[in-house]
Image (cartoon, grey):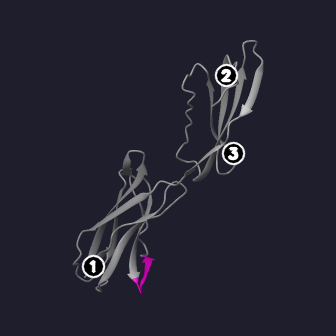
């Protein structure tokens, strides 16, 4: 930031504009904060998309005459956090009619890695006719540890299955690896 030549004091209003055009955060910085840095906080429930940082500077000379100017806007893009899904079956070689327990774990992305995705919607899917379809009666919700157990009675035919974490307004969805029941 280039201040006018005889600047004695300055202050800056910083506004973070969200993808919807509304103010998502703001800060006030003044010359006592020598670095001129501003901290803006965005909560996890804000929209993914492009954000714009706008700043207006007020510079004061020795006689406290005010000069106001805008800095060039700056932009950045925020995406939804990703999820990871894993699944393990109680057996991959069940007998016809046997109940198979699928242990599903869902994790969501945070600044320091992936952590339990609590109360996420999950469902089992089966590969039928070259397409993944939801298995009826298997929609569930993870607990506070990001885990749930889904139960299915084996029909007797070999089938490929996977678990899916459904995306929502806060996170993307994801799929586990594939298991084959024979």
Q: Main secondary structure of the magenta part?
A: strand
Indicate which disc, 2 or 3, sits on the residue closer to the N terminus: 2
Q: How far is mark 3 from mark 1, CA to CA?
A: 51 Å
Q: Earlier in the sequence, mark 1 or mark 2?
A: 2
Which residue is denoted by mark 3 in the rendering? 22
> Label 1 to label 2, Cα distance in Å?
69 Å
Q: Which residue is mark 2?
A: 10
Q: Nearer the viewer, mark 1 or mark 2?
A: 2
The residue under label 1 is 181
- Label 1 element class: strand
Which numbered disc, 3 or 1, marks the residue that appears first in the sequence? 3
Q: Are marks 3 and 1 in contact (CB under 8 Å)?
A: no
Q: Residues within 10 Å of mark 3 (few under 14, many from 20)?
A: few
Give residue 66's position: percent from left, percent from top: 76, 21
- Which of the two marks, 2 or 3, is nearer to us in this view? 2
Q: Tell which tag, 3 or 1, sits nearer the viewer.
A: 3
Residue at image position (67%, 18%) is: 9
State left or right for residue 164 relative to residue 169: left
Closest to the observer: 120 or 152?
Answer: 120
> Magenta residues?
128-134
CB atoms of marks 1 and 2 within 8 Å:
no
Q: Residue shown at 47%/64% (left/top)?
A: 166
Of residues 170 and 32, the one drawn nearer to the viewer in this rendering: 32
Q: Dot 3 lies on which element? A: loop
Residue 130: image x %, image y %?
A: 41, 85
Q: Is residue 141 left or right of residue 35?
A: left
Locate residue 54: give its quadrant: top right
Q: Residue at x 76, y 25 (%)?
A: 67
Q: Quadrant of residue 59?
A: top right
Residue farthest top in this picture: 63
Q: Is residue 129 magenta?
A: yes
Counting from the top left corner in percent of width and height, residue 95 is at: 22, 81
């Amino acid at each position: 930031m280039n201040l006018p030549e005889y600047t004695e004091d300055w202050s800056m209003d910083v506004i973070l504009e969200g993808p919807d055009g509304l103010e998502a955060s703001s800060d006030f910085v003044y010359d006592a904060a020598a670095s001129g840095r501003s901290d803006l906080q965005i909560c996890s429930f804000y929209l993914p998309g492009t954000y714009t940082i706008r700043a207006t500077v007020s510079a004061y000379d020795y006689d406290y005459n005010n000069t106001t100017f805008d800095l060039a806007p700056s932009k950045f893009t925020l995406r939804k956090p990703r999820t990871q899904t894993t699944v393990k079956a109680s057996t991959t070689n069940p007998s016809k009619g046997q109940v198979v327990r699928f242990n599903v774990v869902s994790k969501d992305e945070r600044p320091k890695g992936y952590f339990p995705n609590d109360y996420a919607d999950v469902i089992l899917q089966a590969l039928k006719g070259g397409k993944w379809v939801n298995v009826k009666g298997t929609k569930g919700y993870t607990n506070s540890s990001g885990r749930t157990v889904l139960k299915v009675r084996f029909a007797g035919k070999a089938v490929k299955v996977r678990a899916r974490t459904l995306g929502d307004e806060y996170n993307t969805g994801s799929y586990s690896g594939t298991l084959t029941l024979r």
